[in-house]
Amino acid sequence: MSSDLSLNIDIKEPRWDQGTFMGRAKHFFTVTDPRNVFLSSEVLEDSRRIVENYRVGIVSPGLTEDELWRAKYVYDSAFHPDTGEKMILVGRMSAQVPMNMTITGCMLTFYRSTPAVVFWQWVNQSFNAVVNYTNRSGDAPMTVKELKYGIPVTDEDGKRLGESTSAAQQAIVQVIVSRIGMAVPAMAIPPVIMNALEKRAFLKRYPVFNAPIQVGLVGFCSMKVSSLEAELQAQIQERSPHTAVVYFNKGL
């Protein structure tokens, strides 16, 4: 295929239908693919060039649709969606599975002494801080300022419609719930399984497998316009009367 690749492919949206479970699964498996951690700077920059050129109507000679989507997901895995900056390696979504598996597995394994608990909690919270900083909103950190003045809301095409304090409040609640919820399966399920395994002869005979099994077990935003402030509703009605739902970046 030559440079006749269509310019009508919307690479701002996921490749697969997000209205189906399989579409969402394929999208997030691709976004969090750990193999992207090992991509060289040259590959990342080449993907950036392909994506940025395509956005302005320039198609690289011989580029296929599959190659375009591959470049889009490589770009998304390494560059901040708002600022375009290359993200810190361990803070990227592609690093989440191996990093969280390792840290959570170690937290569940080394808990018998206070120094070990303190050390692994420090590692865990340091990692969380890096992830939060790396994936922060491109407009500003989520602070009192955002609660007072609001965060940007957009229509489904990404067009900025204004700032909403209601969206900021909802974003913070979603972050709190999601952060707690993400840790529940990894911190609650493995101990139950390990407690059952430790009663069997296998782990008593081969205790060295305790840590690897723990690590292995660990592996396994929109808002209605009617919910926004009256002033912003009026502003959206004037600028985009057909918009019923707005979107915002809740951050991490």
Image (cartoon, rainbow, N blue to C red):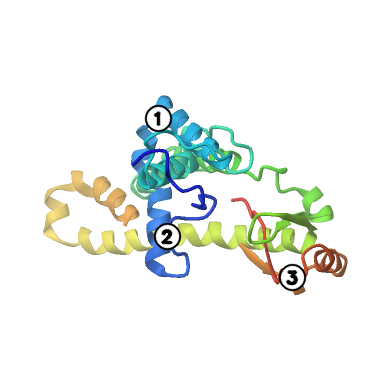
Answer left or right for 19 relative to 227.
left
| Vertical comparison of 67 with 178: above or below | above
Residue 123 appears in the figure: no
Which residue occupies the extreme top position in the image?
Answer: 42
Calculate the distance from the C-alpha at mark 2 to the C-alpha at mark 1.
Answer: 23 Å
Q: Quadrant of residue 37?
A: top left
Q: Quadrant of residue 62?
A: top left
Label number found at residue 128: none
Label number found at residue 43: 1
Q: Nearer the viewer, residue 176 or 105?
A: 176
**Dot placed on the residue nearer the N-terminal end, 2 or 1:** 2
Residue 73 image offset from top left, x and y in percent: 44, 45
Residue hosting label 3? 225
- In what quadrant of the picture does the N terminus appear? top left
Residue drawn at the location 66% of the way across and 62% of the way down = 173
Residue 216 image offset from top left, x and y in percent: 28, 51
| Vertical comparison of 142 with 228: above or below | above
The nearer-to-camera label among 2 and 3 is: 2
**Dot placed on the residue nearer the N-terminal end, 2 or 3:** 2
Residue 31 appears in the figure: yes
Name which residue type carries label 1: Val
Q: Quadrant of residue 164?
A: bottom right
For the residue labelled by badge 1, is the local secondary structure a helix, a strand or a loop?
A: helix
Calculate the distance from the C-alpha at mark 2 to the C-alpha at mark 3.
Answer: 26 Å
Residue 185 image offset from top left, x and y in percent: 41, 62
| Vertical comparison of 252 with 116: above or below | below
